[in-house]
Amino acid sequence: ELKVEQNPLFLSMQEGKNYTIYCNYSTTSDRLYWYRQDPGKSLESLFVLLSNGAVKQEGRLMASLDTKARLSTLHITAAVHDLSATYFCAVEETSGSRLTFGEGTQLTVNP
Amino acid sequence: EAGVTQSPTHLIKTRGQQATLRCSPISGHTSVYWYQQALGLGLQFLLWYDEGEERNRGNFPPRFSGRQFPNYSSELNVNALELEDSALYLCASSKRQGYGYTFGSGTRLTVV
C-alpha cells in the first residue's frame, strides 16, 4: 500500500523567510502533484511533476522530484502572507490511477 | 471553459438517510474521481469512474456507491448515513491517466 508522508505538518514562518516542505512516498511512482487548499475550499493545482529530476517554479514556490529517493520538495522563497494555506502532495499510483495524498502541511505566514 | 461542478454545495442529512452528490466533469474529460476529506482523516480516495465503468475503489464500505452517466457526469450515493460520514466530498476529473486532475469545489455533507 502506497504511503505518503509530509513534514512538517504545521509550519509557522515570518514573511520574507525561506522554507521547504518535504514529501516522502513509499513505492515506485513518477507522477507527483502539489495542491494548495484554503480553509473550506477545494484543491488548487500548483505543480505536476512527471519525471525524475523535474523542477517547476511558479512565483515564490518551487517544486522538485527525486524518484530514486522517493522524495519531493516544495520550496518557499521570501514568504508572503498570501501563501498561508494548507499544501498537499499527492502521488499517483502507477496502477489504478488514483491519488494518494499526504497529510497536508498547514502553512501560516506571519507579518 | 467551465470547471468541475459539484452539487449541492451543502447537504444536511439525518443519520440513516441516503445522500446523493453530483459531479459534472470538465468537457472532454472522461474520468471522474471521488475523494472524502473528513476532519482529522485527510483526503481519502473513494471511487474512480472512466467511460461509464467503475475502475477502482478505495477502502470504503459498500454503502458508498456511485455511477457515471453517458455524458460522463457522476453521482455518489451514500446509504445508511453515519455521523462519521460528515465530510467534504471532492470530485475531480481528468482527460486520461497522468494528465492531471482538476477538482471541483466540493459538497459539504453534514450528518446529524
Image (tube, coloured by chain):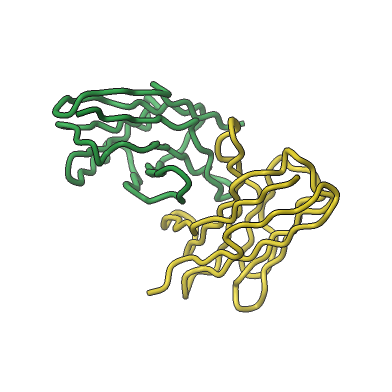
Chain colours: A green, B yellow
User: Residue placed at 23% from the left, 36% from the top?
Assistant: A81
Q: How many marks?
A: 0
A94 relative position to B66: left or right:
left
* Residue B50 image offset from top left, x and y in percent: 61, 64
A111 relative position to B50: left or right:
left
> In front: B9, or B101?
B9
User: Residue placed at 40% from the left, 30% from the top?
Assistant: A106
* Residue B103 image offset from top left, x and y in percent: 47, 56
As drawn, which residue projects farthest toward the bottom? B71
* Quadrant of the rendered image containing residue B85: top right
Is A96 situated above or below A104? Answer: below
* Residue B93 image offset from top left, x and y in percent: 51, 61
User: Residue placed at 58% from the left, 30% from the top?
Assistant: B40
Quadrant of the image containing the C terminus of chain A: top left
B33 relative position to B81: left or right:
left
Quadrant of the image containing the N terminus of chain A: top right
* Quadrant of the rendered image containing residue B100: bottom left
> In front: B12, or B85?
B12
* Quadrant of the rendered image containing residue B48: bottom right
User: Residue placed at 44% from the left, 54% from the top?
Assistant: B98
Is B88 situated above or below A62? Answer: below
